[in-house]
Image (tube, rainbow, N blue to C red):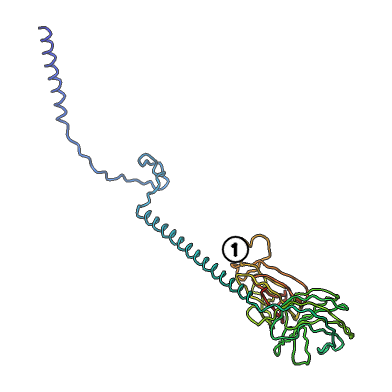
Amino acid sequence: MKNKSVFIVFFTFSLLLLGSVSGPLSLMPSADALKGQGVPSSQYGSATKGIVCGDRLCSEVEPEVKKEEVKKEEVKKEEVQKEKKEQVKTEKKESEKKKLDDKTASEKARYDELSLPPRTIKTGTVTSVQDPGLGHESHQLAIILPPSEKVYRGLFTFTASEDVQLIALHGPLKEGEDKGQAIWSPDGETKYALTFVPLNAMAGTWQFAGNALAVHTMNEDPFTVSYSVAYRERTLSDTVKSETITSVQDPGQGHENHQLAIILPPRPYAYFGTLGFSASEDVQLVALHGPLQPGQGAHGQAIWTPDGKTFYALTFVDKETSMGTWQFTGNAVALHTMNETPFTVSYSVATGQ
């Protein structure tokens, strides 16, 4: 009974306490959130760097890049990559086409060489006669191959009864083409450029190219020569020539003060042949190899370039002579001087086996 009375008293007291708290709460006025109108400030620039933006200082927050700008940048990159891929494809196609064209041209050149006229091989012994050339009346001459409108190219091996010189003729020259090079003429009207090789030996071998071949001495007494010669008599073409030309300013960078006479112009596959020449002054022999691939011209070899973009390796032979013969290979062949004034050269050249 006593416990029940205590419970009733405690329950009544709780109700009274709850009423006294809820009453003041209902009397509190409601508060509406008002939109901030900003706070005026006279601080700008570095004076505001300490202001907090979220979880970082405002000065540490990087400006956001708009999604649209990011998308444009990505599209631009994709377009650039696409253009690069297309360019690589185009360059690859052009490279493959060039290789195919070069292969076709090389195969044609090979076919032309295989279809050359048959090689003639001749052995004989002859006795010299008085040289019929004007100004050479006190000399002796043994003609091995007589003058021809075609170009002889071959190998001559001999043994003679005394020391001899070797001769190749180039021509006949057209009117006005004799401009300082050595000349041989039987009558003063028909003129040939003269390659004179002062071998001054009783025996030897000579790779030659010319419109005639002979053995010579500066003595009045006849001599005897026994020989074997293997040659082809070639019809004139782009790679078989007998002509006279005048040099031009060397188009190579760094060679602007030099002169160049191009015998065989640059081509992708190499020439192989023999050149016989007679020039109006001492010349150097030039062969080019290439064009070189990117980076190949940076290894110390001599280089020739007409434009700073296309590079060739340069073979430069200074024989200090105005006449001679040259067995060569290369992607181009020329004669050269380090002088500014032009020179004249008469020559015979033939390529192929």
Q: Is residue 7 left or right of residue 211?
A: left
Left or right of 334: which side holds 93? left
Give the crowd class for mark 1: few <14, some 14-19, many >=20 residues within 10 Å: few
In this view, the residue farthest toward the right is: 221
Along the line of sight, which residue is nearer the eye, 214 or 325?
Answer: 214
Which residue is farthest top? Answer: 2
In the rendered view, tell whether residue 299 sits above or below residue 30: below
Comparing 152 with 291, the one in front is: 152
Quadrant the N terminus occupies = top left
Mark 1 belongs to which amino acid?
A: Gln
Residue 235 at x, y percent in the picture? 66, 82
Q: Which residue is mark 1?
A: 293
Asked where in the image residue 182 lies, by quadrant, the reply is bottom right
The number of numbered badges drawn on the structure is 1
Q: Where is 290 relative to 168, above or below?
A: above
Q: Quadrant where the C terminus lies?
A: bottom right
Residue 217, how many percent across, how many down? 85, 82
Q: Residue at x 84, y 80 (%)?
A: 225
Left or right side of 11 for 73: right
At which x and y percent is residue 296? Answer: 62, 61
Q: Quadrant of residue 260?
A: bottom right
Q: Is residue 291 above or below residue 237?
A: above
Q: Find numbered disc 1 in the image and state the secondary structure of the residue it sits on.
A: loop
Residue 18: percent from left, percent from top: 15, 22
Determine whether, in the image, residue 46 is placed left or right of residue 202.
Answer: left
